[in-house]
Amino acid sequence: MLNREKAVAVEAARQAGRLLVDIFEHPRTIETKGASYNLVTEADRRSEELILALIHEAFPHHAILAEESDIVPPESEYLWVVDPLDGTTNYAHRYPMFAVSIALWQQGRPVLAVVYDPLRDELFQAERGTGAFLNEQPIRVSATTSLRQALLGTGFYYERGEPMRRTLRQIEAFFDVPIHCIRRDGSAALDLCYVAAGRYDGFWELTLGPWDYAAGMLVIEEAGGIVTDAAGQAIGLFSRNILAANSMIHKDMLAVLARTA
């Protein structure tokens, strides 16, 4: 059992969440990194500093990989993967959909996950082999058996070229099934947790960083769902795309995506 690790992750997520809420309605500094649409705010940096300080104090020999910085000591069995503000573009525009995501990986796979939505005070968490929970209550993926009954989520990366056009082709292909509808909320960590909680039946996105899915994928797996890449292969720490769903529609989603490859 990872009781101490879980306690630190939950406390770090809650403290960072409170910080993000405190800053949310105030004027903030917004910058870009890489692509001109990829935003970073003062809140990202302050949240990350808080989380990394708590983790490093408790586990000084663990490696840390975070969106805005990284501290990766050699030969570390444990790796913390941190997104201090998942949904930065939402946050920068005061759109109320963002989260803190913290995962612990051991020898190449996630073993602990915490995703916190501070505006709704929803804490998703999972530990490998013990199930998935929302505010201490067990959650499961949906029982939807057909894509025709499905509500799906997706996401767009910051690139405005072929990745965006390919995603739009995929959206069109899913609507041709037809499905109930598609949502785009702008926080992959929450999107994945929504699959775990049965709010979405499935989710896919073509371009992600490891901090986007490192926690959410474990929450889904512990809630009884399936997580692969868009070709049906196992997800690793540096996979670039993701497909998550309940076991009954995962293969059908793969088939739709294959038609637009």
Image (cartoon, rainbow, N blue to C red):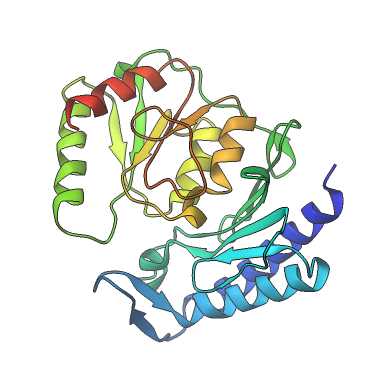
Relative placement, left or right, of 222 versus 198 is right
Where is residue 190? Give x, y as percent.
Answer: 49, 48
Residue 134 image position (x, y, % from top left): 66, 41
Q: Is residue 147 above or below residue 60?
A: above
Q: Quadrant of the C terminus?
A: top left
- How many marks overall? 0
Decide which of 35, 79 is in the foreground and name it: 79
In-image side of 8 versus 240 (left or right)? right
Q: Could you tell me which residue is drawn at 64 percent across and 43 percent down?
A: 110
Residue 96 in the image: above or below residue 126: below
Residue visible at 43% across and 55% down? 209
Question: Is residue 36 shown above or below 118?
Answer: below
Question: Quick one: 89 or 260, which is closer to the camera?
Answer: 260
Picture layout, residue 154 above or below residue 62? above
Question: Residue 260 or 176: which is nearer the viewer?
Answer: 260
**In this rendering, position of residue 254 left or right of residue 187:** left
Instruction: Find residue 194 and report its horizontal and vertical position in percent.
Output: 50, 39
